[in-house]
Image (cartoon, rainbow, N blue to C red):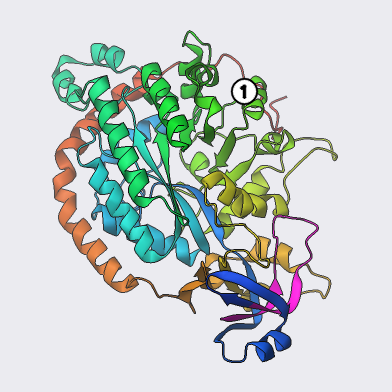
Amino acid sequence: MIINAGYILSNPGNPNSIPLRDKGIYIQEGKIIEIGEFSTIKKKYREEEIIGGDNFLAMPGLIDCHSHGRGLSPLRGGVDYDHLELWLSRTSKVPSPGKYLNSAYSAIKHIKSGITGMVYIHIPPFPTLNSNQLFQDSLAAFQDAGLRLSAGYSIKDRNFITYDDQKFLNELPSSLTQAASELIPEETDGDLFDRFAREFKELKNKYEKENMNIFLAPTGPQWCSKSLMEKLTKLALSTDSKVHIHTLQTVRQKEFGQQLPEGGLLEYMNETGLLDTDLTLGHAIWLTEKDIELIKSKSVSITHHAGCNLHLKNGIAPVANYLSNEVPVAVGLDDKPISEDEDMFQEMRLINSLHGQNNKELSGYSLNPADVLNMATKNGGIIGGLTAYSGKIQKGSAADIILIDTNRIKEPWIHPDSDIRTLLFHKGLAKDVQTVIVGGKVIMKNGKIRTVNENEIKRKFSANLTAEITKKKKESDIRSDLKPHIRSFYEGWTPDSYEPYYNVNSKK
């Protein structure tokens, strides 16, 4: 196969990498074999299929480094955005079309956004009945769609309603205590972990290969006991597994950590040994300067979910500070990006705009498009454990490439000196992506998915959801009844003072 490209962003995350013009890319057996003048490539490999054209821009595929595979977003599932702790109390209301269909539609949305690889973090129902099969249903959907995948198996063993379930239950009206207690699993610590570890090892042995990585995904330190975290550390080290964990997503999680004997969630995690694994923190909004020094010393990485963090009123992660301290950061859409269409281009623009607010001095460090493109390509592959993906278009690399139609981006006129990468970054949309190639296989061409039947998946998706909504009523009702009590429980869970990383405005 030959790609004809008017522009090639061979290394979009490198600000010194100049876009190539009017080149051809020859692909064979999933690899990039040669890059050169299109006319020369065409003549040399005259029997090969040619895709693309003068108006197309070729670049490495984008990576979503944190997704829960929700084809049906919670917003479309009937749960409006709110503070995370209140929002979580209502997510059981969201119906499911079935795990395979939910993940299949998620995969379709990702492909249409130019995403060639993703990090899927399985969030099972609790108690974790049938979690193993649900996880495998999701893997099958992503594999069928043709995406490169890293998949995390999740576990938690405490705080199923609030960050102190026993205290919360004690404060509840007696009329709600029994129903609320039924939301807390009864499985013992030992039985829970032993079953989880056995299933994790079986999944890793069955699925892990060049285009798929299986990793550990404890849900968060406030949801995992110290004993569980210590066991997970040993499991990660013994199986050479990555670990991805939601951490310090909200100010209330920070307050929870400060109440621990260790004096903070990062210190708590460090004592369990988890920081010494190949660890990624999801969200990581409420880290102190001391925390940043600690994770830098432990080579911990971070995934940044800008849109989700705004929707759920979490705050703004100090990404500029992470990057200036050489802490690696990747982009995660988290099923709740700023665009309901899961448009990675809009999310990248949001990230760039948010983190240009760091300093009132002109010399202050702020992000630029190359930084964000690096987060969405090369860093996403490294942090996500997508080992075959390089984030570059170069000889010998896996052919994970997207083709973007530049006609809309350039219309009606652009200055001859305009930089196509900057234009793409500031004006590009998911709808401009026309072709998606993963490992040399074309999984979308001319905007049409080739690996799965998009219309049939949407039809089944809709039909199943319509039938499912009536089954969700009982648990949804008790969660709604608990919401005002959860809100009351968290009153006062905030620090006495703030000292923000970014200067945004001032009361005085």
**Image-quadrant location for residue 131:** top left
Label 1: state its secondary structure. helix
- In this view, 46 is above or below 178: below
Camera-side residue of 496 and 452: 452
Magenta-colored stretch includes residue 317: no
Magenta-colored stretch includes residue 19: yes
- Residue 267, given in percent of the width and then of the height, sits at 54, 17
Residue pictured at 70% horizontal, 38% vertical = 323
Is residue 493 shown to the viewer in this render? no
Q: Is residue 133 left or right of residue 79?
A: left
Residue pictured at 66% horizontal, 29% vertical = 296
Q: Is residue 25 left or right of residue 148?
A: right
Location of mark 1 (residue): 291
Three-letter amino acid code at the position of disc 1: Asp
- In this view, 366 is above or below 392: above
Q: Residues within 10 Å of mark 1 (few under 14, many from 20)?
A: some
Is residue 502 shown to the viewer in this render? yes
Camera-side residue of 480 and 460: 460
Residue pictured at 50% horizontal, 63% vertical = 113
Specify the segment rendered in magenta.
1-25
**Image-quadrant location for residue 225:** top left
Camera-side residue of 199 and 305: 199
- Residue 69, given in percent of the width and then of the height, sits at 37, 51
Q: Is residue 381 left or right of residue 228?
A: right
- Residue 159, given in percent of the width and then of the height, sits at 32, 22
- In this view, 94 is above or below 326: below
